[in-house]
Amino acid sequence: MKICKGKKNIALIGARGSGKSEISKQLSKLSLCPVMSTDMLSSYENDGLSITEIIEQEGWENFRKLEYKILLKLAKIRNIIIDCGGGILVDIKKNKPEQKSTPSNKKYLKAYSEIYSEAKAKLLKRHCHLIYLRCPENYLIKFNEDFSTQLKTYNRPPFFKTDYSKLLKERFIHYEKVADTIIDMKQENSLEELTNFIYQQYFR
């Protein structure tokens, strides 16, 4: 099975909780194309550390730089499905040098500014057909609140409601800017139906 639309790979983008990982797995079963998760590869590159542990040790800035290095490697592979982390399109600018770079910092958006990553966006656009799984903000905030109580299971840093709402609004702009296809993740459509739609449209 090959990926059509004239690109080497399919990349799923969108916020945490939008369904990227589940749809990637289902697409892989249908197409027999392997899934590459940027978060999982980040852990691999750091001897199995969780994303939370990587950020605690290396900081947000270095984590975002690591994502770019991973995308450079993935660009050399054909016919893969890339499950992108929610912040794949941003880099980090530190506003307060003295602020400790912890993943659970409630003042995250005061200590840091997320800036659009031209480098990562260009790399993804050059080598992938980008599918944005668009979800309502209120759903994503609720998912994050539930998700933040299960960090031991998911190993992801939490966001806090006020900060996350602002962060999402900024990231929505980035996702829509680069997307080749936007799919609205409506409740009346099951993940299986959406996966089948993507499969029929972009694989042959």
Image (tube, rainbow, N blue to C red):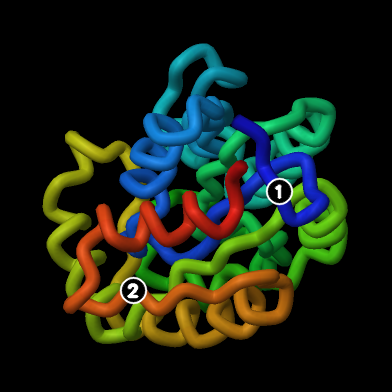
Residue at figure coordinates x 51%, y 35% from the top left: 37
User: Looking at the image, which is closer to me, 94 or 79?
Assistant: 79
Q: Mark 1 is on which residue type? A: Cys
Tell me: residue 29, above or below residue 88. Answer: above
In 3D space, how far apart are the residues under numbered discs 1 and 2 (Cα atoms)? 22 Å
Residue at figure coordinates x 26%, y 39% from the top left: 154
Q: Residue 127: x and y, percent?
A: 81, 47
User: Looking at the image, which is closer to me, 189 or 13?
Assistant: 189
Q: Residue 47: x and y, percent?
A: 52, 12
Tell me whether circle 1 and circle 2 mark residues in contact (CB < 8 Å): no
Q: Residue 16: x and y, percent?
A: 38, 60
Left or right of residue 153, residue 80 in this image: right
Q: Mark 2 is on which residue type? A: Met
- Evaluate whether residue 176 shows in this view: yes
Left or right of residue 167, residue 151 in this image: left
- Evaluate whether residue 104 shows in this view: no
Numbered label attached to residue 4: 1
- Rendered-image quadrant of the C terminus: top right
Tell me: residue 59, above or below residue 165. Answer: above
**Residue linked to disc 2:** 185
Left or right of residue 179, residue 199 in this image: left
User: Looking at the image, which is closer to me, 29 or 72?
Assistant: 29
Q: Badge 2: how crowded within 10 Å, few (<14), some, or many (20+)?
A: some
Q: Residue 3: x and y, percent?
A: 67, 42
Task: Name which quarter of the figure residue 148 lies in.
Answer: bottom left
Instruction: Specify which label sits upstream in the sequence, 1 or 2.
Output: 1
Task: Name which quarter of the figure residue 152 lies in.
Answer: top left
Task: Name which quarter of the figure residue 68 lies in.
Answer: top right
Left or right of residue 153, residue 39 in this image: right
User: Looking at the image, which is closer to me, 158 or 5?
Assistant: 5
